[in-house]
Amino acid sequence: MSLPAAPSPRRAAAWPLVLLGAVLLAALPASRTNALMTPDAWNSPSADEQQRIHAVLDTYTRSVSEGDAQRFESQLLDLSIPFSGVRGDLAASADLSTIQDYAGFRKAIFESGKRFKQRFSRIKIEQVGELAQVSLDYETALQDEAYEGKGWKVLHLLKVGGRWKIASEFFTRYPPRGSPH
């Protein structure tokens, strides 16, 4: 019976490095701030934060559907946040006041005497610390009509006093199928 061949000097020298690497990986804390996380994971919310942000989105759609401006506004950082539809190129003179149009949304949705409904899909949440971004598709319609108004919106949220608040919203409508963008 012959003895197994001795490992090559190169392979034998690599074992201490492999062992050291395994020890270091085991010693690192299993947290979201782990230095070995991929960039895609850096801004992934925890399950708790994702649930809290979804609660803001649920309150958003419920308050629109129920015509409850007060509940809707409780989700906003304040009433003068950047909040605007984007329809084409902004004028060269555009400034912050150009896009602070929550009042226009409030008038159309909550003060028009019409009842709307809205639903969200394709929701993507990114979050690091007290800053979150939500990108989603939306559909809006009058209460008793089929959804036909479809678009995309981006919300920025800030965590204030332990609660997520909408700090900005920009939205646009998708062009009708077959039309140029």
Image (spheres, grey):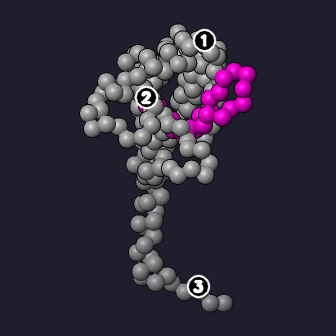
Q: How far apart are marks 1 and 3 (CA)?
A: 87 Å
* Of pointers 2 and 1, the one earlier in the residue sequence: 2
* Of pointers 1 and 3, the one earlier in the residue sequence: 3
Q: Mark 1 points at which residue?
A: 113
* Residue type at the position of mark 1: Gly
* Residue type at the position of mark 2: Ser
Q: What element carries label 2?
A: strand
Q: Which of labels 1 and 3 is toward the front?
A: 1
Residue under the image location 50 percent in, 15 percent down: 107
Name the residue furthest bottom: 2
Q: Distance between the residues labelled 2 and 1?
A: 21 Å
Q: In this view, does 113 lie above or below 91?
A: above
Indicate yes or no whether the magenta region holds residue 168.
no
Which of the two residues, 90 or 50, is positioned nearer the viewer here?
90
Callout 2–callout 1 Cβ contact below 8 Å: no
| Residue 120 point in image, percent of width and height | 62, 33
Q: What element carries label 3?
A: loop
Q: Which of labels 2 and 1 is toward the front?
A: 1
Residue under the image location 45 percent in, 24 percent down: 166
For residue 100, which numbered disc appears in the image? none
Question: Left or right of 73: which side holds 91?
Answer: left
Question: Left or right of 92: which side holds 20?
Answer: right
Q: Mark 2 points at which residue?
A: 84
Q: Quadrant where the N terminus lies?
A: bottom right
* Of pointers 3 and 2, the one earlier in the residue sequence: 3
Residue under the image location 31 percent in, 24 percent down: 97
* Residue type at the position of mark 3: Pro
Q: What element carries label 1?
A: loop
Q: How far apart are marks 3 and 2 (CA)?
A: 74 Å
Q: Name the residue under label 3.
A: 4
| Residue 49 point in image, percent of width and height | 53, 30
Residue under the image location 37 percent in, 41 percent down: 89
